[in-house]
């Protein structure tokens, strides 16, 4: 354990062991070679790769009484902790412990420390078997559940610290049995309910703290029997009512009369009312923190206590009580004045008030109510999913649903939080939210149909948390003016372009930034290097390009860095290998084509807190560094698969425990057989499958490159003239090394390349990346082929699917005979366009498991809907318009869970309309110009979100009946129903709820914007402008949405229907491009 020790004097030397650093022996005899009673090696940089052995050695010392290894990476196994019969003190804080199982065996233990570890679950019952225990320190772990009632059995306990955990429930009444307890500290948990009255019986209490449990409530106890109380901390809860008149009345009079003995009482930020007990004035030196309550005044006697508040009461001339709390109708940021002339209590404005002492801000009930009412009316509040008490002038605004105030729900001012996520808000957020709510701390309007501007956000001086994901912000210009913003959620807002310059004005305050699922582009700015407080950066699935700026590596607090699925390229700076706080680094690239991250794999060698590292599907090359993640002993998942890494897996990785590391799909040639004994690796699958759980060995393959289930076993490659055994570990096929130039040359010859319209550089240059229509990654592997409308004739070779990195294949508008045989080899093929190629069937297309977009329109595909297509479970866009497909539509499309666009128009489908109720991601559905009959099902599209825009084209079929009222739930539906046999259209579908339908044309033209009524007609079947109204037509007496009159088709007076529909498609397709990859 002394490999990197800070101090090791005499260790392993010839000196007597009792003289070695940190060792104490019986009778303090440094000349002895036995009788070790104490080991004290605190913060000595000790570490081990065999904690079980170290534990066994420590606890084999028969005379050991005290062991202190705090601040070393030595997570001991406590199975043998009972072997030293007289062990009394065990200091294991900050050692990496995840369990203290076995601790109950140390029956003589009096002092136990295990703070600052990662111990989870309920509080260990074993501890309550340690009946001699006097001191127990369990803070800074992740204990959950309630504090067991058995805590009352530790009657000798004097000190119990368990703050900063995750414990819940009410405090057990059995705490009252701890008759010897002096320090009881349980702050920063999630306890709730009242303080048990039994705590009043703890006469020896010196400190009692339950600060910031937030949901503890009820009255403050008297603690009148505690004679020695030095600190009482109840801050940051919901305690209410009056402070008892005999509060702390039992304190020792000699002690509290000495100005050298300070008593500290924190009651701030609760809901206490009434008056402060005069009896506190008997305490000579008191720090009384009572701001942020609902107290009316400070007793005059308090203002004469010159030692109070660290002497500030005696220092402030004129208004000494201001050191305790600002009086009503004044405020300061801390609720009090600190010293003369420093942060004074400022008077409220003429239209403002502060009803209580210790106010952080002034409020104007009328202004705050105006702001909230403006939000309600401007976002269609009557249609909110929940609006309890809103607009009810008899109820305090702090009781309105989603509104929180500085006090409790009975208050009528000082709004601090508005939480209305996914609540069906629809409209524009009023500017009063920024400028009428001076205490606003948190605003959560995410997942609503809300438009927001940031012109006045500079007036929201206390706003720290802003959740506005998945709403319409249009632009984030001006957001940089937010003076206090710490946490910003801007996920899935359809934002494009570069981040505005003023965005980086947030550098002094911003800690968490979430901008995933947008379309931000350009390079990641080096200005991010100014955001020294940034802890979390999530920019997943945008279009950022260029390199990752090394300035991110200079951010001292950065823990989570996520830039996966952007279009970043180049090398990763080695500075990222020296980030002390980093826990997550994610830059994988599984979906998007284009240049990728490349160069040598960074070592990340000095990132001790790293838990997750995701770099798969990039172009890193060279060997894995020997010091790869060497300091990251808590790493749980590393993905470096599908790169171009070569050589051996460094044996140094063996020191890591419980690691999941994905390395398949590289060119690795050697794996130390010792890895096969790391049974805890890969979630224990190494125990089940040996080395195959890491990677299939050379000459073998699996669809995953490794075995992770019984069905994915590594299989031996067959040797033939065409196939040689794969030479690498982690192969996903037995395919031999691909010669991409030969494949392209074959494509050229098989499709009469000499007759192509453009064959620039084909066969003339050795660099295939310069050949017309060929795009490469990093100038190496073919990633895209764009040869549409280029006169390719014949059958493209099956070998084309062997291009390993091929993402995009566009061969549309060529007179060819395309075949899908072999498409299973194209494991990275995402986008395939074969429209207008004369295609007659789709045999074998179901093997293209990676396909996301498939365009087969304008072909000659006939017969029923091809069932093979249902095998393409990643498909986001399927276009089959203008073919000759017949028969009924499939009853279910559930395999298409990611489908966003489905176009089946201009075929010959017949039978009933399918509900498509299993397609949750759908945005565009075209079934026009078929022979569908019957009514629209009531559950039509019922799995799609109400708030998402969707386009549906059912025109030119034989559908009948009425349009189902169930569609009324959609906010932004574009629906085409012309040229059917509909006989009913309810006005409910055309009212104010549906103003967003048909691109807001329903708002302008009512029901006519959906379908023209019987007795009229229009070439579009609906009114879409003042120049093309629904024209009177006496021959049409039965049906809605007719496009003929007296048997004659009507002519367009402006843009043709197809052109107008194309504009809508273009608009929604801009959304689709991003959505397809998000869904996958």
Image (tube, rainbow, N blue to C red):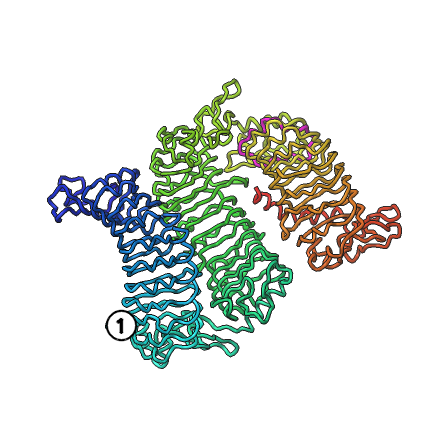
Q: Point out the image quarter for the C terminus.
A: top right
Is residue 23 covered in magenta? no
Residues in magenta, as a range: 797-820
Q: Residue at x 51, y 18 (%)?
A: 720
Tag 1 residue: 256
Foreground pick, 785 / 755: 785
| Left or right placement of residue 211 versus residue 720 in this view | left
Q: Quadrant of residue 671?
A: top left
Residue 254 position, x and y percent, is 23, 73
Residue 443 position, x and y percent, is 52, 61
Q: Main secondary structure of the magenta part?
A: loop
Task: Answer above or below: position of 179 versus 656.
Answer: below
Q: Quadrant of residue 345?
A: bottom left
Can residue 922 be seen?
yes
Foreground pick, 510 / 681: 681
Name the element at disc 1.
helix
Q: Residue at x 40, y 35 (%)?
A: 681
């Amino acid at each position: 354990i002394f490999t990197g020790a800070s101090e090791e004097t005499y260790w392993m030397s010839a000196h007597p062991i009792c003289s070695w650093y940190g060792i104490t022996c019986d009778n303090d005899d440094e000349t002895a070679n036995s009788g070790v009673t104490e080991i004290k090696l605190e913060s000595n940089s000790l570490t081990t790769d065999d904690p079980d052995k170290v534990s066994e050695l420590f606890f084999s010392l028969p005379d050991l009484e005290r062991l202190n290894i705090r601040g070393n990476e030595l997570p001991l196994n406590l199975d043998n902790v009972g072997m030293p019969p007289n062990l009394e003190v065990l200091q294991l804080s900050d050692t990496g412990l995840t369990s203290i199982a076995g601790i109950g065996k140390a029956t003589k233990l009096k002092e136990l420390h295990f703070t600052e570890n990662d111990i989870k679950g309920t509080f260990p019952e074993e501890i309550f078997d340690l009946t001699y225990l006097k001191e127990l320190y369990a803070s800074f772990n992740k204990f959950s559940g309630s504090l067991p009632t058995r805590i009352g059995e530790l009657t000798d306990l004097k000190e119990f610290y368990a703050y900063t955990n995750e414990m819940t429930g009410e405090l057990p009444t059995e705490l009252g049995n701890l008759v010897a307890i002096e320090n009881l500290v349980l702050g920063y948990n999630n306890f709730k309910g009242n303080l048990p009255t039994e705590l009043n019986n703890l006469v020896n209490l010196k400190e009692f703290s339950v600060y910031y449990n937030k949901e503890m409530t009820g009255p403050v106890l008297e603690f009148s029997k505690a004679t020695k109380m030095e600190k009482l901390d109840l801050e940051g809860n919901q305690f209410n009512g009056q402070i008892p008149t005999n509060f702390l009345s039992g304190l020792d009079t000699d002690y509290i009369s000495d100005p050298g003995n300070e008593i500290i009482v924190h009651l701030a930020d609760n809901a206490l009312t009434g008056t402060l007990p005069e009896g506190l004035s008997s305490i000579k030196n008191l720090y009384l923190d009572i701001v942020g309550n609902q107290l009316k005044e400070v007793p005059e006697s308090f203002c004469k206590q010159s030692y109070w508040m660290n002497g500030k009461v005696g220092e402030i001339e004129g208004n000494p009580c201001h050191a305790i709390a600002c009086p009503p109708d004044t405020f300061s940021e801390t609720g009090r004045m600190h010293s003369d002339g420093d942060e004074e209590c400022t008077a409220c404005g003429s239209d403002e008030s502060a009803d209580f002492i210790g106010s952080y801000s002034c409020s104007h009930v009328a202004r705050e109510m105006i702001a909230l009412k403006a939000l309600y009316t401007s976002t269609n509040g009557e249609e909110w999913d929940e609006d309890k008490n809103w607009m009810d002038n008899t109820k305090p605004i702090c009781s309105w649903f989603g509104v929180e105030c500085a006090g409790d729900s009975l208050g009528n001012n000082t709004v601090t939080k508005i939480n209305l996520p996914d609540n069906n808000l629809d409209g524009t957020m009023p500017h009063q939210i920024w400028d009428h709510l001076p205490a606003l701390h948190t605003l959560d309007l995410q997942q609503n149909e809300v438009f927001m501007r940031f012109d006045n956000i500079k007036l929201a001086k206390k706003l720290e948390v802003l959740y506005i994901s998945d709403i319409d912000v249009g632009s984030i210009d001006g957001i940089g003016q937010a003076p206090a913003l710490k946490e910003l959620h801007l996920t899935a807002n359809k934002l494009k372009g570069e981040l505005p310059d003023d965005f980086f004005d947030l550098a002094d305050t911003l800690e968490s930034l979430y901008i995933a699922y947008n379309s931000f582009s350009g390079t990641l700015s080096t200005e991010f290097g100014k955001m020294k407080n940034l802890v979390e950066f999530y920019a997943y699935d945008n279009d950022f390009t260029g390199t990752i700026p090394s300035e991110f590596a200079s951010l001292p607090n950065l823990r989570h860095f996520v830039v996966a699925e952007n279009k970043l390229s180049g090398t990763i700076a080695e500075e990222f290998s020296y980030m002390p706080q980093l826990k997550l680094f994610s830059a994988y690239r599984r979906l998007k084509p284009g240049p990728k991250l490349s160069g040598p794999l960074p070592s990340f060698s000095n990132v001790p807190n790293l838990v997750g590292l995701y770099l798969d599907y990039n172009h890193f090359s060279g060997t894995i560094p020997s010091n790869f993640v060497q300091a990251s002993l808590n790493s749980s998942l590393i993905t470096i698969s599908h790169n171009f890494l070569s050589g051996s897996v460094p044996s140094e990785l063996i020191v890591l425990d419980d690691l999941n590391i994905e390395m398949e799909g590289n060119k690795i040639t050697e794996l130390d057989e010792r890895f096969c004994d790391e049974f805890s690796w890969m979630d224990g699958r190494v125990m089940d499958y040996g080395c195959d759980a890491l990677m299939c060995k050379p000459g073998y393959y699996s669809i995953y490159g490794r075995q992770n289930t019984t069905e994915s076993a590594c299989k031996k490659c067959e040797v033939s003239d065409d196939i040689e055994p794969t030479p690498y570990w982690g192969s996903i096929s037995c395919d031999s090394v691909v010669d991409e130039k030969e494949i392209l040359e074959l494509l050229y010859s098989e499709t009469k390349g000499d007759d192509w319209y453009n064959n620039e550089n084909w066969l003339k240059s050795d660099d295939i990346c310069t050949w017309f229509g060929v795009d490469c990654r990093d100038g190496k592997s073919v990633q895209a082929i764009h040869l549409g409308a280029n006169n390719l004739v014949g059958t493209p070779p099956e070998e084309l699917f062997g291009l390993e990195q091929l993402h995009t294949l566009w061969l549309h508008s060529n007179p060819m005979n395309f075949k899908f045989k072999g498409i299973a080899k194209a494991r990275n093929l995402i986008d395939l366009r074969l429209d207008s190629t004369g295609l007659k069937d789709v045999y074998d297309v179901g093997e293209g498991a990676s396909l996301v977009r498939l365009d087969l329109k304008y072909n000659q595909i006939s017969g029923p809907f091809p069932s093979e297509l249902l095998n393409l479970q990643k498909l986001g866009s399927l276009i089959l318009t203008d073919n000759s497909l017949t028969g009924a539509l499939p009853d279910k499309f559930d395999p298409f869970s990611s489908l966003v666009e489905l176009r089946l128009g201009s075929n010959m489908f017949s039978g009933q309309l399918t509900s498509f109720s299993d397609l949750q991601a759908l945005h565009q559905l075209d079934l026009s110009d078929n022979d569908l009959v019957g009514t629209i099902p009531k559950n039509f599209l019922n799995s799609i979100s109400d708030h998402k825009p969707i386009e549906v084209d059912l025109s030119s079929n034989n559908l009948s009946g009425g349009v189902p009222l169930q569609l009324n739930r959609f906010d932004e539906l574009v629906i085409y129903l012309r040229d059917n046999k509909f006989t009913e259209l309810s006005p409910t579908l055309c009212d104010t709820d549906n103003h967003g339908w048909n691109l807001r044309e329903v708002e302008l033209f009512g029901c006519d914007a959906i379908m023209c009524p019987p007795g009229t007609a229009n070439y579009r079947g609906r009114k879409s402008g003042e120049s093309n109204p629904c024209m009177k037509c006496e021959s049409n007496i039965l049906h809605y949405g007719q496009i003929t009159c007296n048997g004659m088709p009507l002519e367009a007076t402006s843009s043709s229907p197809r052109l107008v529909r194309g504009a809508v498609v273009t608009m929604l397709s801009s959304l689709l491009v991003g959505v397809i990859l998000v869904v996958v």
